[in-house]
Image: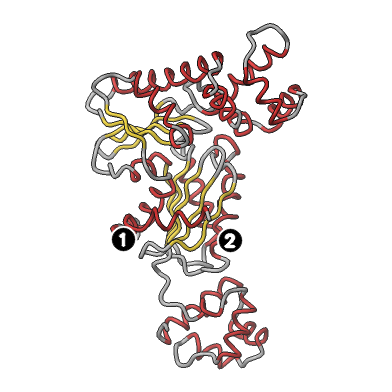
Amino acid sequence: MADLTQIGKNIRTYRMREGLTQRALADNVLVSFQAISAWERGLSVPDLENAIRLANYFGVPVDALFAESESSLLVGIDGGGTKTEFLLFCSDGTQIKRIVLGCSNPNVVGIEKCAQLLKCGIDEMLGVYPQIKAVYIGAAGFLLGNNAETIKKELESYYDGRFDMIIQCKTDVLNVIACADLQKTDCMAVICGTGFSVGIKEKDIIKTSAGWGYLVNKWGSGFDIGRDGLYYALMDTEGIGETTLITEIIKDNYGEDIYAVLRDVYSKGQSYVAGFAKIVFEAYLKGDVTAKKIIEDNAACVAKIINQVSKIHPNITQIVLSGGLFANSTIYADLVKKNIAGNLVATVIEFPQIYGACLESARMCGVNTKIIKENFVEEYRKWDK
């Protein structure tokens, strides 16, 4: 059991979360003001009956009131064009809570919606564990302009006075670099999922290349592959293009009316279109000629930008491949590797990008990451059960 001082801190933290004075809390849980004061100062502890009342009022387990110091509770967040993953964990590597929400790229959804989504996920974590010490956010679109700083200020203002935690906002490129354990090495991080970007780490300076957004980019992202698949399926449907299995698979998955799918493209946007990439890969595996062309052409685009960026940064030979297109299939990574320059060494990261965000969250608080590294994979598996 935690010492009296820690129990008092826990009660005070939950009270502050609710925005209550000690007297107001006393009124709500039917005890005296002096009792609340004594508990928070560590002079005494609530008995079981009062502990249950407090826990019920705060909406938390009774154990949370008596928990050991939770200053080691940390949150890592990986934000992308389709999903944003939140992971609450302890410095001993134990993973406590995982949340997956939608797109948080401010260049796609805007600063306001990005901040709102992040607040939603963080609020859910704080709802049970308000003792969180640090929140690290590594997200797509944060390196453009002053996006990261703007969102950081918004979050700090929103949580100011209610929670004692550090907030940091950085690019998702750092998540990838941390996953690959290349923080001390000059390298290139290629993120290819719903969208596409290249991150360069050179002498501790991080910058991006070719991350212009899906309406301008044509570098082999999930959006690019999905759009190409829809394009050829529509050409096939109207008899002005070659027959392709992509058309048949779309109809099997989305219904007979491919034009209804087309209407949804314009209302649902980037992540919806990127979802058709899996259909193109399915057709590819079945030997479809059109799908083969789409996959190979887009992989060549990825390799082309890697080769071009490497010419500008000739000292960088280590390439890290990350994102859904590489994580979900070796096909795409193998095709990219086949087309990159001979002096470059490309590897696909073994861990999800949230792992890198968790490592960065620990580092910003001076927490030893060794045990987190040792336990992460086994702990992470439990979320699939």
**Label pair 1/2, CB-CB below 8 angstroms:** no
SS of the residue under disc 1: helix
Name the amino acid, label 1.
Answer: Ile
Q: Check disc 2 and report the residue beneath it.
A: 124
Q: Position of residue 79 (x, y in %)?
A: 50, 44
**Based on the displayed image, in which of its 4 quarters is residue 93 positioned?**
bottom left
Mark linked to residue 371: 1
Left/right placement of residue 46 relative to residue 327 reads right
The one nearer the camera, 151 or 264, is: 264
- From the top left corner, tell me how far across and down residue 300 is, in percent: 42, 17
Residue at 48% of width from left, 56% of height from top? Answer: 87
Hey, what amino acid is under mark 2?
A: Glu
The residue lying at 41 percent from left, 75 percent from top is 69
Q: Against 138, is 370 above or below?
A: below
Q: Is residue 235 above or below residue 353?
A: above
Q: Residue at x 46, y 65 (%)?
A: 132
In this rendering, would 367 be left or right of 213? left
Q: Residue at x 53, y 52 (%)?
A: 154
Binning the other alpha carbons within 10 Å of mark 2 as few (below 14), some (14 to 19) or many (20 upward) gives some
Q: Nearer the viewer, mark 1 or mark 2?
A: 1
Sequence-earlier tag: 1 or 2: 2
